[in-house]
Image (cartoon, rainbow, N blue to C red):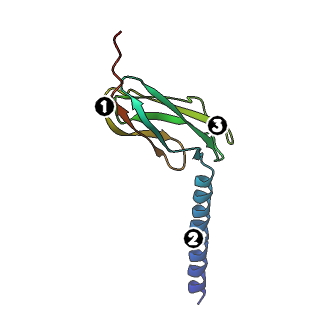
Amino acid sequence: MYKVYKDMKKLMILCAVIIGFAFTASAQTDNKAEFKFNEEKHDFGKIPQGKPVTTEFTFTNIGEEPLILADVKPTCGCTIADYTKTPVKKGDKGVIKITYNAAVVAPFNKTIIVTSNAKTPQKYLNIVGEVVAAPAASSR
């Protein structure tokens, strides 16, 4: 009987330790940095061919730790990204500036991949619109 009690005691201690580790791991992930964007998709509407257009995606760090953008990568060479390179503290704002080169007459839907130390390490932003032929220059 004493051996059964001793084994149960060991089992209870082991369970308590495992549960403690689970709560600790859970608490640590809750403290990570986290994005809150004003918008995640921007519609340029109709834009004239040959005129680059720019928009800014503004975000706030609503997490506990400083938010660090490791990379902001457009999926197309026609799009250029510039972004906040310094850590964004809790409650502070950062900016991702996207410029699209409207070279080809056609509708477009481009994705920008944002990699960071946030709870969700990859975030996807989108820009959409339609490039229309520029009006012909009048000759006088």
In space, the residues marked 3 and 1 are separated at their CA atoms by: 35 Å
- Marks 2/3 in contact by CB < 8 Å: the verdict is no
- Does residue 3 lie above or below 30 as drawn? below
- The picture places residue 139, in percent across and down from the top left corner, at 33, 11
Residue farthest bottom in this picture: 1
Q: Tell me the residue that label 2 is attached to.
A: 14
Residue 129, percent from left and from top: 40, 38
What residue lies at 67% left-to-right and 42% top-to-bottom?
90
Out of 139 and 83, give the one closest to the viewer: 139
3 vs 1, front mark: 1
Query: What amino acid type should be assigned to the residue bearing mark 3?
Result: Lys
Residue that protrudes farthest toward the right in the picture = 91
Q: In terms of secondary structure, where does tag 1 sit?
A: loop
Disc 1: which residue? 105
Dot placed on the residue nearer the N-terminal end, 3 or 1? 3
Q: Quadrant of the C terminus?
A: top left
Residue 88 in view in this figure: no
Q: Is residue 82 visible in the rendered structure shown here?
A: yes
Give me the C-alpha separation between circle 2 and circle 1: 66 Å
Q: Secondary structure at mark 3?
A: strand
Per the image, the residue denoted by label 3 is 93
Residue 83 at what x, y percent from top left? Answer: 53, 30
Q: Position of residue 30 (x, y in %)?
A: 61, 54
